[in-house]
Image (spheres, helix red, strand yellow):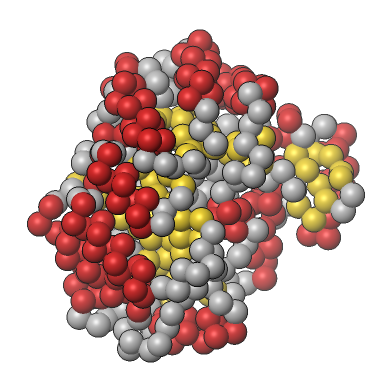
Amino acid sequence: MGNGANHNTSATPTDFVGRFCETPVQEAASDTDALQFQYEKLSPIQHIYVHIPFCARICPYCAFYKDLLDRSQTSRFCEALVRELVGRDRRARRLRPSTIYFGGGTPTVLNIAQLELLRCGFHEKLDLSELVEWTVEANPGSVSARKAAVLKKFGVNRISLGVQSWDGQLLELLGREHNAQQAEESFRILRTAGFTNINIDLMFGLPGQTASQWRASLEKTVALQPEHISTYCLTYEEDTEFFLRHAKGELRHDEHVEAEFFEMTMAILENAGYEQYEISNYARPGFESVHNRAYWLGEDYLGFGPSAVSTIGMRRWQNLCDYRAYSDRVLSDQSPCATIENLTDEMKRTERIALALRTRDGISASELKDSAQIDEFITLKLLRKSTDSFLLTRKGKALADSVAEAFV
Ligand SMILES: C[S@@+](CC[C@H](N)C(=O)[O-])C[C@H]1O[C@@H](n2cnc3c(N)ncnc32)[C@H](O)[C@@H]1O
Ligand code: SF4
């Protein structure tokens, strides 16, 4: 089934808006700072994504931009990140975000000194007076009580913990650093540190995963009572080891099984009081991610760090997918931007449809022009009308990407 899960690979427009390593190169990078500055004056940027590209080990299914942790590079990288926040000509840019999202890679592989460097930099360079949500992605292998305390001091109020599975064998297959016990311990450390908004990421449709393993993972997650749960169907991303193994027939997937697991997910999580507010995302009332909802609503955002994407108005640009070159550029006062793309109205509309259809609010009726197609989907019980918008039915959610494609 279509996943559209997380945050930043190269798949459909539904995937990973705001951070991905897609490469729709339209023109060479030019001065994005000036552009940014103009737009910020017109409409302040509310959402900031920050990419930390280091990982302690590389998972064989992962297509995000990341590199093996090299401790000799991380401090320099953190300095570059803080420098990028200010902009090259040091104009009095003082962003006032309402959300910040530190993703990766693995932000929690940074050591205490580097996290402190970022904390000071972000507090000094940004106006955080209107910040409502600051999320940091954490890997169970790299959470400690001290790091959790530093993140709390940061002002971070939401943690997204990459558990993926509670099954030891599947965690090994995924090449994860942690085991189930460490994941549980990390969750408890975060709770003890005072985090009251924790997301757990899980993956399903894993090779060989049985329905009872998936059910057990969901039940174990629910028992811990996180405020938010994201469930992503494994996608075989190009340029990954899993992709090659899948192409050779060593790893297989079965769409019927994936659909069955997706159904099971909705049933178990909704029964446990989590509302599915986006196809892959479930939250207790009031704990929907403000940052991710902003992406899905097509709001502007600025991305910092290597591979980070920014979208302001009809322009989208992406930083270099190479953290060394990124740091070199930023620290020598050059732009880290690699590509700039001019968006068209049609591209924006396509994205709006693909993203909004996946949410519980659905897509506004005025966006969907093809009434014959709408009628067909309604007859097939894939879509339903609600006041002025169209929503996917339960059956339609499993086919979200195909439904969206039919409208673009
Ligand atoms: C930025 S990624 C990784 C965050 C963190 N480094 C980790 O691994 O836990 C966010 C989430 O995307 C999901 N993900 C990554 N690769 C995926 C893939 N190929 N298919 C489906 N989900 C994927 C995982 O659930 C992961 O937690
Ligand atoms: S730890 Fe996360 S970001 Fe790093 S390789 Fe694994 S899945 Fe990708």
152 vs 281, left or right, is left
Q: Nearer the viewer, residue 304 or 136?
A: 136
Q: Quadrant of residue 41?
A: bottom right
Query: Which picture quadrant has residue 272?
Result: top right
Using the image as rendered, state which of residue 146 and residue 305 is in the foreground: 146
* Observer-nearest of 369 and 119: 119
State how many labels appear. Answer: 0
* Left or right, residue 71 beside residue 122: left
Residue at x 51% of width, y 10% of height: 212
Instruction: Identify the image quadrant of the C terminus.
Output: bottom right
Which residue is drawn at the image coordinates 87% and 53% (left, top)?
388
> Can you give x and y, in whole percent of width and height, for residue 339 in the image?
40, 71
Q: Is residue 266 visible?
A: no
Q: Position of residue 107 (x, y in %)?
A: 31, 50
Position of residue 52 relative to residue 347, above or below, is above
Tell me which residue sits at (62%, 62%) in the image: 298
